């Protein structure tokens, strides 16, 4: 009976660890640390259109200029074809890095990255300024539930 009890405890412990692993991987990054932010905006980018990318970057830049960068929290969530904005060869890279330096955050959807890796056999590269999130749409939902206003330029 002791052997069965020990095996049962080991099995339960293993299942507990296995069940906790996906949850840990899927945790959202913490909200931006901007204690004086009066406005919180999440910008959605879900398509690979140069005009749309430019518009998202322009909106973020204009908000930074209109409000002091410490007074506005801006998070751009890229998923689906929108992750192309965060590729190293994207012509908007300097603008992205400039906005990051001012305190904006760019999230990249790992579900999209994983899908592209399965389809192409190679994991796509993205810039170091990108913050990986497991599910882009879930990140948008998380942010809106925490006081961010969603804007889809």
Image (cartoon, rainbow, N blue to C red):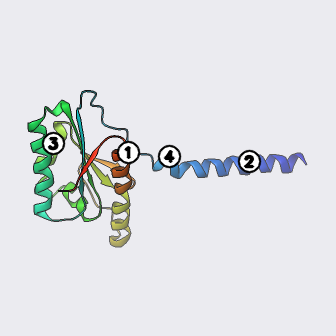
**Residue under label 4:** 24
The quadrant holding residue 118 is bottom left
Image disc number at residue 145: 1
The quadrant holding residue 99 is top left
Q: Quadrant of the C terminus?
A: bottom left
Question: Regarding mark 1 in the picture, which secondary structure is present there?
Answer: helix
Residue depicted at 34% across the width and 38% down the height:
31
Q: Position of residue 144 (x, y in %)?
A: 33, 46
Q: Position of residue 129 (x, y in %)?
A: 24, 45
The quadrant holding residue 48 is bottom left
- CA–CA distance between discs 2 and 3? 49 Å
Q: Is residue 41 left or right of residue 25?
A: left
Q: Indicate which disc, 1 or 2, sits on the residue closer to the N terminus.
A: 2
Residue density around tag 4, few if under 14, some if 14–19, many if 20 or more, within 10 Å: few
Tell me whether the residue at label 1 lies in contact with that at label 4, contact meaning CB atoms closer than 8 angstroms.
Answer: no
**Residue under label 2:** 10
Question: Is residue 36 placed above or below 146 in the rendered structure?
Answer: above
Question: Is residue 30 placed above or below 120 in the rendered structure?
Answer: above
Q: Nearer the viewer, residue 114 or 72?
A: 72
Tell me whether the residue at label 2 lies in contact with that at label 3, contact meaning CB atoms closer than 8 angstroms.
Answer: no
Residue density around tag 3, few if under 14, some if 14–19, many if 20 or more, within 10 Å: many
Q: Indicate which disc, 4 or 2, sits on the residue closer to the N terminus.
A: 2
- CA–CA distance between discs 3 and 1? 24 Å
Tell me whether the residue at label 4 lies in contact with that at label 3, contact meaning CB atoms closer than 8 angstroms.
Answer: no
Residue density around tag 1, few if under 14, some if 14–19, many if 20 or more, within 10 Å: few
- CA–CA distance between discs 1 and 4? 20 Å
Foreground mark, 4 or 2, reads 4
Q: Is residue 105 left or right of residue 135?
A: left
Image disc number at residue 99: 3
Q: Is residue 27 left or right of residue 15?
A: left
Tell me whether the residue at label 3 lies in contact with that at label 1, contact meaning CB atoms closer than 8 angstroms.
Answer: no
């Amino acid at each position: 009976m002791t052997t069965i009890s020990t095996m049962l405890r080991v099995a339960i412990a293993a299942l507990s660890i296995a069940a906790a692993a996906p949850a840990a991987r899927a945790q959202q990054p913490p909200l931006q640390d901007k204690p004086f932010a009066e406005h919180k905006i999440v910008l959605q980018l879900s398509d690979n259109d140069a005009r749309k990318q430019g518009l998202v970057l322009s909106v973020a830049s204009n908000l930074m200029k209109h409000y002091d960068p410490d007074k506005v929290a801006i998070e751009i969530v890229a998923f689906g074809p929108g992750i192309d904005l965060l590729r190293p060869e994207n012509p908007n890279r300097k603008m992205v890095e400039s906005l990051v330096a001012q305190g904006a955050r760019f999230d990249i959807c790992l579900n999209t990255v994983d899908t592209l890796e399965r389809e192409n056999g190679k994991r796509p590269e993205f810039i170091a300024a990108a913050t990986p999130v497991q599910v882009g749409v879930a990140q948008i939902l998380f942010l809106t539930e925490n006081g961010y206003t969603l804007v889809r330029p």
